[in-house]
Amino acid sequence: MLKKDGRMVQTILTNIKVVGQKLQLSLAGLGSFTATDYQHIFPLQRVSSEVLEWVIHELSWRSSLQKLPRRIISTFFDTVQVTAPLSVVQSKCYTLQQLQRYLVDHPHLAEQHRFVQRMFDYLIEHPPEHRKPYSLSALRDHLYAHPRVQSRHKPTIDSILNVLAEGWPLDSLPLIPQDKTPRVRLPSPLPAEFYRGSYSKLARWTIAPKGSVVEVDATLIQELQAGKKEVSLQNRITYARQRTLDEILQQPMVVLDIEKPLFNTDEEEISWTALIALQRGQILEKNIVSLYALPSEVQGFQTKVALDEFDLVAQVAHRISRYRQPSIFVTYNVPFDAIQLREAGEFTIGEDEEEPKKISSLRFFERIGIKSMEVLDPLRWARTQFDYLPNKKLVTVAKHVLGEASFQKQITYEQQAELEHLCKSRSIAASPPVQQLVAHRSAPEIIASYVGEDALAVTRLIQSEVFHHGLEDVVQMSQLFTINPFLLLHDAKRIQDYLECKFFQKVGIFRDALFSRFTVFTKYEQRVKDRLFRAVEKSFPSSGEGVFSPITKVYLPLGRVLRQDVSWFFPEAKQFYGSVDQYKDDPQRQFFLARYEDALAEWMWKDYAAYRFERDKLRKMIPKIEERKQFRDYCWNWANRLRIQGLEEKLNRSAVAQKDLLPLMMDTDQKYLAQRGVSFRLFFEEFRQWCKVRQKNRMLWGSWEAGWDTFEERLKNFCDSVNQYLQQHGLKVVHAQNRYLYLQGNTAALSQPESPVIPVDEIETSYAAGGSLYYQKHGAWEGIKREKKPMHHLCVYEMDTFGEFLDDILARKMEEALTGLWRNLDALGCHKVPKEELVWKTGYSGKYRAYEAGEEIHFYEWNSEEESQTKLLKGKKFIITREKDEAGSDFIQEPSYQGKDLVYQKRWLRFVHEIKPDWEIYVARIAEKAKELVKPLLGRDAQQFVLDALAREPEQRLEFYLGKLPRQIELF
């Protein structure tokens, strides 16, 4: 902590989040505590004007809500904000005697106070025989059942209970001594129309984000040092700034790597861990903890032996805790390593020795939190900094950053598994490659070196210049946009936290509440963005197919296109753009910052993409331009009629129904439909689509004060400027994919400050075919996967056949490529391919796919003794049992969710070697891909080549096609 003056002290806010209905905070050096007086702002969700009026009336009428501060905000729609404690969303229980005293004096029941007294006297003496605490409906049913209650009494009973249905009183009801009367549960006093959620998010905005430097009042420090765990904030914590780069680099770090050599087998366990402690970037200590005996030191790592997996986890946790209290936890792919350790034992680290927790569970993008520790995942940084690489595996990223020779995998995963078995039992026979390895060192020493090398590679990554540049840049952005730098480092889109805060301040509601993140909406957003990117791709036609060497991969920074528009709404962005332009001579740094610039502009592009998506659907419905113009004028006429009928709100929401139009039909409408030759039903579908287009354009105007034509013009001008620059500097487009172009020619011009694109990578040799580009980078493939096990989209035969072909192509061995492909296709045509190479497998679920008897089958491999398995779906366990059909074949009914609906699908239980391949389907599938790959070599003869290779009696032999191969100069 740094002393500032007599009353305020600066320290780091290490944690801030809402748990349950309590705000919990942690301060460096002071520990954790709960704020007793935190007030949350509850915004009203978007509702109709009638509901809005009702809510405003209720806020003024209900005695439980009259004292709450409120604010009405008017933008493109009206909303109300209410400030209240977080506990206002809970239900609460009170005794019948407490409620009796409360209602007798209630101002809305002044005329019924005697009825209230008698009614509750009866309930106290003759309580319902329902489960306690009672619900209001249980009380109502019990009162209605009284023999002396008549129909005229029921409205009075309802009016009394309706006061309670409005929610519990915000002023706490006093306890009554010796009160043992039954309890009644009262609902939240906050109307259901108010949005519940985003509690921690708003706390970060109104107090300070995690990891920031805050000023703490001296009186609060005294209370915390005295051991108080529940304190009043009363503005005693105020945001000061974000941490500087030096402050972050001075924090102790611990780098961790785990290995499970027998992963995904019955013997799976964590048997190896490597830890490296760092202070100010310098290595202080290196340790390896293993289940097997090792020399006391292996390649500079001190070694320790654990009794079992549980003991190994405990030793790792203990070592992390004693490394000078590390405040930054580093591992490559944190969700895997941290959660694996947590599930294997008591992996308790951080303040209060808490276990790591998932704080974002989106699959493949999980985020882990450890109380009062920062989590640094270089994999998440690599996804932003090296998005252009074929994959972001540690070996690929390390070679790219540190050089090809800096990180060499000494053993394969298969060899590692063999070595692990040798560690367990020396009597196991090893393969010849593994025998060569253990001839010089023991199996435990080899694996220890492998694990240590991984940990050192991660350490060298975070010590590298490119990482320090990235960290420096996110620190500057964190100061500007008030966001934790580690969140920014892990995901460029976290800069949108700033946009969400501004949106809340202007509109008065959380953007997530206005645009719910349901699966159907997120899929729609992705679909419209993909459509926009494909439209951008079409602006850059490629120059043909074949082998290209060398080429440069460049990035299209679409965020730059909307700088003027973003700066108009968000002044801080203008300062950010100035810092981006400082690094035009550093492409890697420029690219890294461009990812954040793109994220700032993404909301605008997404809204425009949605408009474009709906507009293109309407154009497909009405393809003729002249007819489209007449239709548009006719729709505006209908819109005016709907407004006159008071249906403008339904029109704006694109929720007009056929029954709304039918009563307004006139003779001129019938003539129009007859002239076009369309039915009313077809016209209604067109009109509904026109309403969607209108709605998307209204959203553009309402959100960004600009229509679709503004964004369309900006995009067109950008694409034209790029094409013009490429043409002027002798550059041609080899391939376009998403937001990347692959260029050949005068690539030196791409490094000029005025270049509209950002060069990100150099590719030595590539092969363009079938609309895809194939090349290798650091041993990883772009355009195709190369694995030894089946994948979801590729079987082993496909990976081997096409992979070997591409290997030879990139090595410029055209005859060998064609010969190898012919041989593999011939094996398929003769049905000589092993069945194990013809299945696809989803790694996450273990489900296989194959073709049998004219259809695609889905199946699992279960042990023959296995009769059932458990599947977890949305937190609910399902027991899946083995069944048999009439033919005696084993199958299961697998549960899954399709939207909100739970469905069961039939899946077979069998072994891979039992499948009976439908060779005709496999041949057709493989032939199509093979034809695409061969076409750059053989042109129009490609299809016949594939047919002949697959045929038992080909029309032409292989030598015929080898003679048709182009000369090297023609191909390159």
Image (cartoon, rainbow, N blue to C red):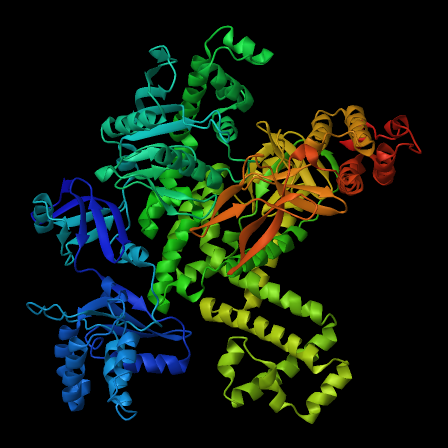
Up the image or down, 597 lies above or below 696; here it is above
Q: Residue at x 52, y 18 (%)?
A: 418
Side (left or right) of 464 relative to 902: left
Q: Quadrant of residue 103?
A: bottom left
Along the horizontal axis of the image, is 263 left or right of 854?
Answer: left
Position of 477 with respect to 103 (left or right) is right
Q: Nearer the viewer, residue 363 or 698?
A: 363
Which residue ends up furthest to the top in the rendered image? 440
Q: Name the residue at 51% across, 20% down.
A: 416
Most foreground residue, 102 or 392? 102
Residue 409 appears anywhere in the view:
no
> Where, quadrant-wise, is the N terminus in this rendering?
top left
- Identify the residue shown where x is 44% and y is 59%: 566
Residue 121 x %, y %: 14, 80
Left or right of 898 in this view: 836: right
Vertical comparison of 884 with 310: above or below: below
Asked if residue 372 is positioned above or below residue 483 in the image, the reply reads above
Question: Quick check: 943 above or below 972?
Answer: below
Residue 33 in view: yes
Rendering coords of residue 145 (x, y %): 28, 83
Q: How many marks?
A: 0
Q: Quadrant of the C terminus?
A: top right
From the top left corner, tell me how far across and down residue 622 is, in percent.
71, 72
Residue lying at the far right of the rendered structure: 955
Tell me which residue sits at (77%, 81%) in the image: 677
